[in-house]
Image: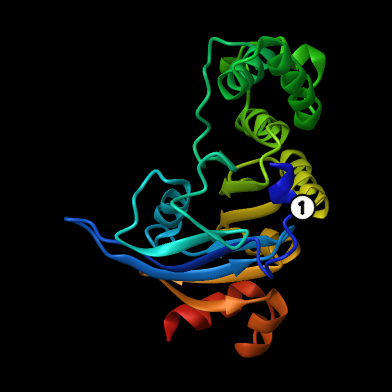
Amino acid sequence: MSSLLACTQPTYMLVVEGLVKEFKKGPRIGPISFKISRGGIFALVGPNGAGKTTTIRMLLGIYRPSAGEIYLCGKKVRSLQGVASYVPEESAVYPRLTGYEHLYFYALLYTGDRAHARLLADKAAKYTGLSTRDLKRKVQEYSKGMKRRLLLGIALALETPILVLDEPTAGLDVHSAVHIRNLIKSEAEKGKTIILSSHNMFEVERLADTVAFINKGRIVALGTPRELLEKYSARDLEEAFVKATSR
């Protein structure tokens, strides 16, 4: 992992070229192409059914692409498996475990070593921002925001060079959303490459270096937030998105 975080030779940490997913039933997704620098925050923005989650699943190796290539640090790879931590939109948690037991369980799955897992779980606990008392409670008692903090905490503690977040703050209260956004920004500043999908234009405009508008399975606009605002003569990203996807 350290060698990937130190990857400075290629201009881009991650290059995606022409990814396509064809289903027997359902719309075709792609071709999808984009590039992300080390420490960059790339946002994939689009309506439900546009292809955001399918794109993420192709990157992670959950879906095998029908076509296209993925390059990591200049080398072609099948997927980001093993180098990316993933926090899905739905909070996949084990309700009967305590918060801390949940962190330790995932850390043990990742490391296979009890001592190392304990260290990672302790580190993840700090990332969550949850109190010691909360971490001793069963996860079934947690709010949605607390569950998201738990999942993000372990994802960050695993120290993979890439972090993939699907709707990271959807449905959260203001305090939880601010905590998660601050963590995302902080990790990018440390050199972690971050991919996020979001409906929240305010969030995207504040976090992302590069934004891709995706609609009906294709990227219809790509650039920095400022470039997209200028291209579509828009006051904000929401207006730019509406103009880009209505053409």
Q: Closest to the observer: 125 or 143? A: 125
Looking at the rendered structure, the kind of residue marked 1 is: Ala
The image quadrant that residue 83 belongs to is top right
Give coordinates of residue 235: x percent, y percent.
69, 81
Query: In this picture, is 231 found above or below 5?
Result: below
Query: In this picture, is 81 found above or below 117?
Result: below
**Quadrant of the rendering where the N terminus is positioned:** top right
Q: Residue at x 41, y 52 (%)?
A: 58
Give coordinates of residue 80: x percent, y percent.
52, 48
Give coordinates of residue 85: x percent, y percent.
59, 40
- Callout 1 secondary element: loop
Q: Closest to the observer: 161 or 228? A: 161
Q: Closest to the observer: 189 or 138? A: 189
Query: What is the crowding at mark 1: few (fewer than 14 residues within 10 Å), some, or many (at least 20)?
Result: few
Q: Residue at x 59, y 54 (%)?
A: 196
Left or right? Give the position of 170 relative to 133: left
Left or right? Give the position of 140 relative to 193: left
Q: Residue at x 37, y 58 (%)?
A: 49
Query: In this picture, is 208 found above or below 185?
Result: below
The image quadrant that residue 26 belongs to is bottom left
- Residue marked by disc 1: 6
